[in-house]
Image: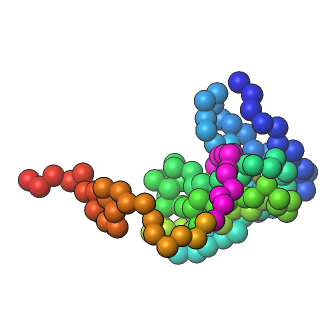
Amino acid sequence: MHGIQIQFKRLRASAVLPTYQTELAAGMDLSADIDAPVVMQPGDILLVSCGFAMALPAGFEAQVRPRSGLAVKFGISMPNAPGTIDADYRGEVKVPLINLGRTPFVVEPRMRIAQMVVARVERAQVIEVNELTDTARGTGGFGSTGTGHQPM
C-alpha cells in the first residue's frame, strides 16, 4: 500500500527519518536528533530537533501528535497538540514537548518522541452572511448533546 510521496532532506547525518512502525500505522514516528540526553523537569517545555526538513505536496499537511506511550507512562505531551506542518514549510521539523508528569524525564538521542500523520486539507472559501441555516442543535454549546454519563 503506497500513498503520496514526500521528499525528506537530512540536515544532519545523525537524523532518523520518519518511519511507520507497523504495516497499518497511521502515524510515522519522529525521533530526537540531539547530541546528548536532556532532562525535562516537571512543567518544562523543550523544543526538540528532528534533524530533517521535508516538502509536502500541495493539498496536504502533517499533523504532529504526542506518542501515547510517553503520555501514559511519563506524562510527556505536546503543548500545541496536534501541531501542523504546512505544505509550504521547508525548515527543520522540531517537536515541542512538555513534561506534565510529576518526575523528571530524560529525552535521549534518537528517542521516538512524537508521531506525524499526513492528511489532506481543503482550503475553505470564507463567505460572510447575515444569517446562518438553522439546525436541531442550534446554538447549543459545550455539553449540549450530553456527556454520555448516566446518573447512578
Q: How is the image coloured?
A: rainbow
Identify which residue, 91 or 44, lies in the foreground.
Answer: 91
Q: Position of residue 136 (x, y in %)?
A: 30, 55
Task: Report whether 105 appears left or right of 21.
Answer: left
The residue sitting at the top extreme is 1
Q: In which quarter of the image is residue 11?
A: bottom right
Whether residue 122 is situated above or below residue 100 in the rendered picture? above
Q: Position of residue 60 (x, y in %)?
A: 73, 48
Whether residue 29 is situated above or below residue 144 in the rendered picture? above
Q: How many marks?
A: 0
Q: Which residue is drawn at 50% across and 56% down?
A: 71
Task: Report whether 100 appears left or right of 124.
Answer: left
Q: Give the range drawn in magenta.
A: 115-126
Whether residue 110 is situated above or below residue 48 in the rendered picture? above
Identify which residue, 114 or 54, lies in the foreground.
Answer: 54
Q: In which quarter of the image is residue 132?
A: bottom left
| 120 in the magenta segment | yes
Q: Which residue is drawn at 78% across and 36% down?
A: 4
Q: In which quarter of the image is the N terminus?
A: top right
Task: Report whether residue 105 is seen.
Answer: no
| 1 in the magenta segment | no
Q: In which quarter of the image is residue 51?
A: bottom right
